[in-house]
């Protein structure tokens, strides 16, 4: 008679391999409460296999979408335990992206993934998402929370956002009418926003010595962590009344000035920017001096205190500057044949 070898076999389960379904289900039930605060009559269903959103009140609507992540700013948030602000970061980043087409946000979905689900960490992230969505009139209609042991580093996580907005087809902003002589206006950022953090972490030696984050930096007037974690600023409510006066909008994110402004320029034009036309915030100055970073590299990586650039005719630009006190003129559109399309003087 053959011996039963089942006694020698190790019993496997999903929980033993690192994924606790019961814990995840309980956490998702808590997340539903945060979602509820952002919903209105446009949301027809949330929580099934797909969420339903009713689009109405438009004549010829065009949906505009954005998908992005927060990047390695997440590592600083995780190291300090200040995870709520990154929820604002990803919502506001995506809002600003679709704003460049003249669109207003409708609904948002998120993806959070980590080594092992931490209920406190997830609750803070989702609370930040909910706060940002509620402040901007956006429905947080769903998302995914993934537990992936053996894939993510313990204590760290990834956060990705998906936003859909809408614009009337006749009101789409695409930069096609931008012409030489048009003016560039800048709008101040609230800090690094969500870009350049790999360089910032390297300059401040954060990965090797995380205690640097708790240091109070006199020239910043706060700790390094608080300065680096200042949430990404949204611009849609500020600009919504003025969109008809704007020919082009550039969100200064990864790639800085050179990587983002040409995306909205038609053929035959470039932009000339006066770097002395606004005050560079102390955080950028500190990164440049401490890291011995070249000026060219700084403007390729960071927003340098200008988070959004508007392009308008000279007359409209003057009116915009009057109507938006925080806006400042930073340059103009010039003819282009060859060479760089962003000239920084």
Image (tube, grey):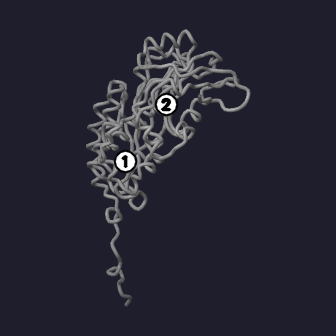
* Figure quadrant of the N terminus: bottom left
Q: Measured along the vertical axis of the image, is residue 27 above or below residue 338?
A: below
In terms of image quadrants, where is residue 147?
bottom left
Q: Residue at x 26, y 43 (%)?
A: 30
Residue contact at pointers 1 and 2, CB within 8 angstroms: no
Viewer-proximal residue among 211 and 251: 211
Read off the residue under disc 2. Answer: 97
Q: How far from the left and from the top, in percent, is residue 31?
A: 29, 42
Q: Secondary structure at mark 1?
A: helix
Q: State the mark number for residue 76.
A: 1
Viewer-proximal residue among 101 and 145: 101
Q: Secondary structure at mark 2?
A: helix
Q: Residue at x 62, y 20 (%)?
A: 333
Categorize mark 2 by other alpha carbons within 10 Å: few (<14), some (14-19), many (20+). many
Q: How far from the left and from the top, in percent, is residue 150?
A: 41, 62
Q: How far from the left and from the top, in percent, is residue 143?
A: 39, 41
Viewer-proximal residue among 246 and 343: 343
Disc with the residue nearer the chain's start (1 vs 2): 1
* Figure quadrant of the C terminus: top right
């Amino acid at each position: 008679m053959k011996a039963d070898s089942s006694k020698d076999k190790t019993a496997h389960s999903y929980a033993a391999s690192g994924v606790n379904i019961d814990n995840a289900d309980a956490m998702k039930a808590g997340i539903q409460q945060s979602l509820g605060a952002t919903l209105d009559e446009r949301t027809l269903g949330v929580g099934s296999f797909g969420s339903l959103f009713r689009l109405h009140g438009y004549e010829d609507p065009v949906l505009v979408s954005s998908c992005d992540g927060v990047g390695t700013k997440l590592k600083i948030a995780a190291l300090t335990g200040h995870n709520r602000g990154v929820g604002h970061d990803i919502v506001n980043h995506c809002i600003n992206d679709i704003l460049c087409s003249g669109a207003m946000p409708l609904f948002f979905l998120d993806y959070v993934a980590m080594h092992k689900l931490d209920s406190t960490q997830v609750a803070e992230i989702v609370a930040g998402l909910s706060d940002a969505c509620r402040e901007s009139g956006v429905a947080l209609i769903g998302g995914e929370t993934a537990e992936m042991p053996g894939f993510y580093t313990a204590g760290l996580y990834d956060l990705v956002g998906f936003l859909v907005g809408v614009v009337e087809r006749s009101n789409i902003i695409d930069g096609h009418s931008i012409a030489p002589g048009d003016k560039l206006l800048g709008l101040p950022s609230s800090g690094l926003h969500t870009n350049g953090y790999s360089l910032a972490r390297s300059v401040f030696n954060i990965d090797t010595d995380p205690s640097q984050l708790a240091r109070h930096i006199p020239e910043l007037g706060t700790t390094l962590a608080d300065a680096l974690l200042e949430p990404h600023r949204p611009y849609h409510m500020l600009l919504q009344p003025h969109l008809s006066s704007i020919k082009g909008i550039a969100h200064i994110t990864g790639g800085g000035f050179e990587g983002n402004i040409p995306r909205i320029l038609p053929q035959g034009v470039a932009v000339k920017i006066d770097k002395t036309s606004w005050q560079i915030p102390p955080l950028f100055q500190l990164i440049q001096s401490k890291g011995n970073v070249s000026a060219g590299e700084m403007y390729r990586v960071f927003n340098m205190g200008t988070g959004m650039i508007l392009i308008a005719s000279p007359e409209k630009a003057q009116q915009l500057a009057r109507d938006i006190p925080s806006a400042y003129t930073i340059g103009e559109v010039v003819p282009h044949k060859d060479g760089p399309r962003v000239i920084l003087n």
